[in-house]
Amino acid sequence: MTQNFDAIDQLAVTTIRTLSIDAIEKANSGHPGAPMGLAPVAYLLFTRWLKHDPADPKWPDRDRFVLSCGHASMLLYSLLHLTGYELALDEIKNFRQWGSKTPGHPEVEEVPGAEMTTGPLGQGCATSVGMALAEAHLAANFNRPDHSIVDHRTWVLCSDGDLMEGVSAEAASLAGHLRLGKLVWIWDDNGITIEGSTNLSFTEDVPARFRAYGWRVLESDDGNDLEGLATTLGEAAASDGRPTLVRVRTHIAWGAPTKQDTASAHGSPLGAEEVRATKRFYGWPEGEAFRIPPEVGARCREVATRGAELHSEWQKGFDAWTATEPELAGEWRRRLGKGLPDDWAAALPVYEADGSKMATRAASGKVLNAIAPVITELVGGSADLAPSNKSLIDGGGDLTSDNPGNRNLRFGIREHAMGAILNGLSLHGGVRPYGATFLVFSDYMRPAIRLAALMGQPVIYIFTHDSVWVGEDGPTHQPVEHMLALRAIPDLVVLRPADANETAAAWRVALERVDGPTALLLSRQGLPVLEGALERGADGVAHGAYSIADCKSGAPDIVIIATGGEVSLALEARSELAKSAIDARVVSMPSWELFLDSAEDYRNSILPPAVPRLAVEAGVTLGWGDVVGGDGAVIGIDRFGASGQGAEVAQRLGLSVEAIVARARELVGDRA
Ligand SMILES: Cc1ncc(C[n+]2csc(CCOP(=O)(O)OP(=O)(O)O)c2C)c(N)n1
């Protein structure tokens, strides 16, 4: 099929190239090479294949487009501007400047039309798998024989660096397994990275690797041949049931006389001389910057017209579907609006403090299963630790290629991809994703967790086996620095509940959060159901900390602050201290972030400024100094753990009732 390209299309491609060059030149910063090489395929995608409506970048049934090689941001901004998104030319002239809508790398909240924040290579590719999964899952649950309200593709532009990163390999493996047929990655095979030729470090047979994952691979040998590229993209758009990798051979900085095919064109402006020579080569006025020929503007804006038509066609179908499926439509609206069902919290289980013990991971599993029938958008799974993480939805079924509507995801041992896929599920909308593994392996997910926080995505992490009480598996499996490491991520809420009731409250906080991720840190070992946690825990957890056992008199002699499993130790210590007339308050502090967010009056009521404080947590002490203040003390673990029985390891590393009592006595002045 011939695609009828004319001189205006060629001119449009050159416009994308020169806009990118000019913006980078003006900013004196940026990456011109990739936009120059990728302009033809990206132009085709945006104008002929991508289903999108520039007037409504949030149209739920739009195709998702991810620029995984975020350093090529000017390519995206040029296309968004030309095709009619709310991104003025002045924004492009302000590329990379404070407050502009054209940040150095695309940022989802800042750039209308950016589906996600990219820049860390590999993340976009892996995240796209979550978007495609969400599409398949929602299509299975919401489409009806006469109405397809969910039917779109997920497209990715990626670079060598994206495909070198392990996270893209993990995600591609899973995408092939799940046969995500509407997923297309377009690989900018330009053979150049920052240090030079890819021959330095990347000589594997990438197409063979992807075929082995179960992908279809298409190849286009000339990244400047619009006709050839269009044929290939057309094939890519026609799914054969497998995800598709399109390898496009391009030239970095195509047209730059001395910089084409060199690493120097990757990440620096071309320079005035080279810009003039490049424009001369393109047949472009040398002296004019940010030039958009009117016929190019008009041609590109046809996308907006076509997009509006596609959107309104979809809307008609959606309205008809709404009329025949009112209940389903209500559910759709609720889910897309990120609202929880009315009265959902009534489903949360409650536990009596009857002396029984329950690991908080077990409590979490019970909470999940109690709310899953009500909160139907909950979809998730574990990186092969579901039995330990208690993360399966009973009766939810495995989400497979044959049953994409099911709710239990089997991520395999792919924590990093799991993190990114959770982001993709969340960014897509319509589902509420959670992922689980041991806390110690949260390190394997950290880049994706950081992006979830940066993008404000309400992903839920279930991190179990949260301390040295893991025991016999030894220091490789015993987290010590992880709580602090997670707390260090801005906008991530970290919650370490002390018992079953606090666990339910922590889930509540996580579910009610719509603008950022939440990590639930849960114990492997059984923990007593604590008195007071049911009555005051729900509110207390939401405030980040509360007094779970107060002093007997008006003011405490000491406040003992603890988190998770250490709260019950602190409570025992309080009873011991009472024997020597030391009147202690125990504060359960499941979340630093929420506590710091609480009103100052509340904080002072929980931690009265004049009272000495002792913090107890089975992790590194770094950071606790700020909580206890200069006169306070911290009991923690500033070393790796050790193999042995959990309770013994903890005891030997200094976490015991006796140790807490002794330190508390020191702080208040020995009264024994
Ligand atoms: C995870 C990660 N590591 C390193 C970088 C820094 N970096 C930016 S681009 C790039 C590689 C550039 O090569 P390629 O991906 O082929 O892009 P091209 O040179 O073709 O533009 C690197 C190492 C990054 N952005 N993300």
Image (tube, grey):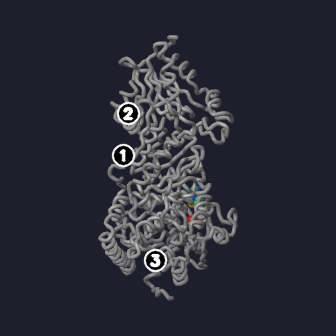
Residue linked to disc 3: 49
* Residue 472 drawn at (x, y percent): 67, 37
Q: CA distance from mark 3 to mark 2?
A: 55 Å
Ligand 1 within 8 Å of the CB at mark 2: no
Q: Residues within 10 Å of mark 1 (few under 14, many from 20)?
A: few
User: Label 2 crowding class (10 Å Cα cut-off): few <14, some 14-19, many 20+?
Assistant: some
Marker disc for residue 536:
2
Say whether residue 462 is left or right of residue 547. Answer: right
**Residue 116 rendering spot, x and y as whole percentages:** 46, 60
Within the image, what quadrant is residue 641 found in? top right
> Is there any visible trace of residue 119 in the rendered image?
no
Pair 3/1: label in front: 1
The tag earlier along the polypeptide, 1 or 2, is: 1
Give percent across and percent down for residue 489. Answer: 49, 45
Please state which of the two labelled residues, at mark 1 or mark 2, is closer to the viewer. 1
- Label 1 element class: helix
Residue 352 in view in this figure = yes
Q: From mark 1 to mark 2, how far is it between C-alphas?
A: 17 Å
Residue at 63 percent across and 34 percent down: it is 646
Above or below: residue 589 compared with residue 175: above
Q: Residue at x 52, y 16 (%)?
A: 666
Badge number at residue 40: none
Q: Which is more N-terminal, label 1 or label 3?
A: 3
* SS for callout 2: helix
